[in-house]
Image (cartoon, rainbow, N blue to C red):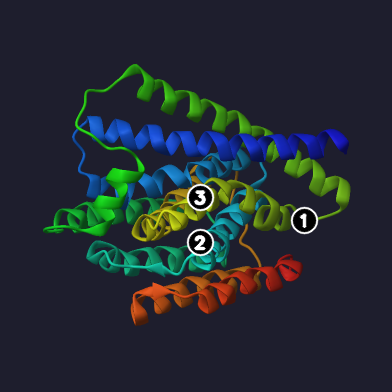
Amino acid sequence: MTLDVLGLIASLGLLTLAGDQFVIGLARLASALRVRPMVVGAIVGGFGTSVPELLVAAIATTQRKPEIAVGNLVGSNIANLSFALAIAAIVAPVRVQSRTLRREAPLCVAAVLLLAVTAAHGFARIEGLALLLAAIGAVVALLLNAGRAKGRDELAVEAAEAFDLRARPVTLRDVGRAMIAMAVMLGAAELLVRTAGSLAERLGLAEGFIGLTVVAIGTSAPLIAAAIQGARRDEHDLVVGNVLGSNLFISLIGGAIVGLLPGGRAPGVGVLPLVVMSAVVLAAWGFMARGRRITRPEATLLFLAYVCAIPFMGT
């Protein structure tokens, strides 16, 4: 068991470090390819921070551990809001000034609710295909939404500053950063799935519970760290954009991966995790829509919702 615990800690640490470097490398590559800072903030950041969850979903599914895969998708959606966004807002109340984000939020909420409906009864090929088509439609909608931005938009400004986006040619350093980080994340995700499954067996815990809690928080760690740093630097719109984008890709692409990869029909999860996931995403959207910000009391409610539900996640 000691080796399993050490492996789990090592995999989580590697995912956090490599995930951060992958997002930076991906953002700078996009900038070098003349991708607009608005698109980097609205799509690239969200996709980059969702890669740990997508890798875990793929590996767990192919290793016939679908409970970990599905639990990780649902748990990460909750952790992104109840930990990453909530802790960032506790550090400094998060303001949403970007018009692009306000138009993007309903799409991200719809993606999470679609995952909840799908996860209620399990994933098969038809569900995976439906989620894949929804993901393609969502990316097109995000691109059109980003293209509608006129004048100064805080999301573009913050993305340019945070990722040091400047007009420059593609460099081997940026390519190497992204490729090495992806390779490290792949190895860490493989180790995470193996050690999490082994620990669940040794401790007599359901693999779904491990996926909803330990694995989910671990794969969300890069986003949690980035959100706290962003809040301290007043990059509030970028924090929100990364959280919304990450949840969208986790829900649609992650669900498609579980449904389409070989491994048999993946089971759903219990009612409580889906209720918590749906409740926190609707609550966060409501807070942002009502006052264009998330205050410390509101963030504390999001945080406590997950903490209080964790002991019952296996039900």
Q: Earlier in the sequence, mark 1 or mark 3?
A: 1
Q: Is residue 232 visible?
A: yes
Can you identify the residue that label 3 sits on? 223
Mark 2, residues whose alpha carbon is within 10 Å: few (<14), some, or many (≥20)? many
- Element class at badge 3: helix
Quadrant position of the C terminus in the picture: bottom right
| 88 sits to left or right of 273 | left
Number of the label disc, if any, that sits on residue 185: none
Work out whether residue 206 or residue 286 is closer to the camera in this orientation and state it.
286
Asked whether, in this view, residue 255 is left or right of residue 245, the answer is: right
Within the image, what quadrant is residue 62 found in?
top right
Mark 1 to mark 3 CA distance (whole Å) = 26 Å
* In-front residue for pair 167/262: 167
The three-letter amino acid code for the residue at tag 1 is: Ala
Between the residue at mark 3 and the residue at mark 2, the CA separation in whole angstroms equals 10 Å
SS class, disc 1: loop
> Residue 89: percent from the left, percent from the top?
49, 66
Q: Nearer the viewer, mark 3 or mark 2?
A: 2
Q: Quadrant of residue 31?
A: top left
User: Disc number at residue 206?
Assistant: 1
Residue at far left of view? 150
Q: Position of residue 178 (x, y in %)?
A: 42, 28
Mark 3 closeness class: few <14, some 14–19, many ≥20 residues within 10 Å: many
- For label 2, the residue is 88
Circles 3 and 2 in contact, beta carbons < 8 Å = no
Q: In the rendered image of this protein, does residue 121 appear above or below residue 143?
A: below
Mark 1 or mark 3: which is in front? 3
Inspect this view and state whether residue 266 appears.
Answer: no
